[in-house]
Amino acid sequence: MKTEVKKLDGIKREINVTVSGELIKNKFEDVFIKIAKDAKVPGFRPGKAPRDVLEKHYAGAVHEQVLKELVPDVYNQAIAAESLDVIELPQISEVKLDRSNLSFKAIVEVSPEIQIKNYKNQKISFKKISVSPDEIKKQIEQVLESRKAEGLDDKFCRSLGYPDLVSLEKAVERQLFTVKENQERQRIESELIENLMKGLEFKLPQSLVDRQIQDLLRQTKLDLAMKGLPRDKIEEQEKMILEGIEPEAKKQVKVYLVLAEIAKKENIPIDDHMPAKVMEFLLREADWF
């Protein structure tokens, strides 16, 4: 196999692939054998037609099947041989195939080169979490108002599933603490991400941006539908919605690519759990104060 890679820009590559010899001949032979087993040719029993007759009746079908099986295999071998980190399906063109040779061109998007340094020992300020008596009181008062209760007594506490006021207050304190704890975690992670992104500029693969835009658009439409907005009104707002979500989509793709780059450096698997695993690693290696 012969491959030639041309750099079109920061993330696009053109791969010209040529294969010849036994690989092509053997693939044609394998496909002909498969087709011959069930081939139906007038004047012959199924699977008994001679090779020259099969060539006449099934040459086109065999050619298409060889392309279908061979191009993906050869393409995958080519990107592996060239160590290309491809992030999207290729655009295949200029395909030529005969009984001895196969050639094609593939345009692919690869992960951008991200020069990320000093991602360990990020400075993180930790704020101690606490819940004040006033916060507990206000939360209980809001529950009282929403239920239109006459007063705060044991009967009211029992209606909420607690034997007395002390138990209710402790439960409210735990709930408020959990909310604050989650908010603090989100603040820390946002601050960490923001610090990582400083000074990092690279071209984003448009295919990833487009995919993320469609995901956010689908979720936004679903949220609007759940709020009772009619479908026609949602469709009318699509252009405005797209304008609003595109910057967020680009930001999310950029963050993902940076986390993926760290994952590669730290031998963290690139799967659905990668962002969370990298974040755990960064927090573990951070300089807390």
Image (tube, rainbow, N blue to C red):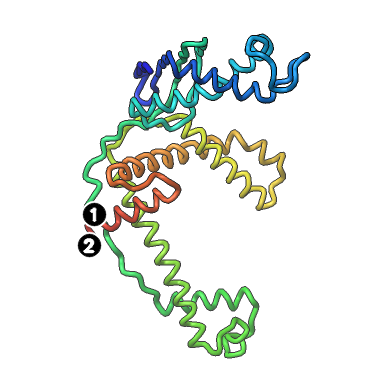
- The residue drawn where x is 55% and y is 41% is 215
Residue 118 sits above or below residue 54 on the image: below
Residue 125 sits above or below residue 75 on the image: below
Where, by quadrant of the figure, is residue 116 drawn? top left
- The residue drawn where x is 58% and y is 45% is 220
Left or right of 204? Residue 224 is right
- The residue drawn where x is 63% and y is 38% is 237
Amino acid on which disc 2 is placed = Phe
- The residue drawn where x is 64% and y is 17% is 61
Between 285 and 213, the one lying in front of the other is 285
Q: Which residue is mark 1?
A: 123
Between 240 and 10, the one lying in front of the other is 10
Left or right of 123? Residue 169 is right
The numbered mark at residue 289 is: 2
Left or right of 257? Residue 154 is right
Between 177 and 43, the one lying in front of the other is 43
Image coordinates of residue 127 in percent, x first then y, are: 30, 65
Residue 230 sits above or below residue 97 on the image: below
How many angstroms separate mark 1 from mark 2 (CA)?
8 Å
Image coordinates of residue 29 in percent, x first then y, are: 54, 18
Element carrying mark 1: strand
Image coordinates of residue 164 in percent, x first then y, are: 54, 89
Residue 277 sits above or below residue 174 on the image: above
Q: Are marks 1 and 2 in contact (CB under 8 Å)?
A: yes
- Give the position of the N terminus as an image quadrant: top left
Tell me the crowding category of disc 2: few under 14, some 14 to 19, or many 20 or more residues within 10 angstroms, Cα based: few
Element carrying mark 2: loop
Q: How many numbered marks are there?
A: 2
Q: Earlier in the sequence, mark 1 or mark 2?
A: 1
Amino acid on which disc 1 is placed = Lys
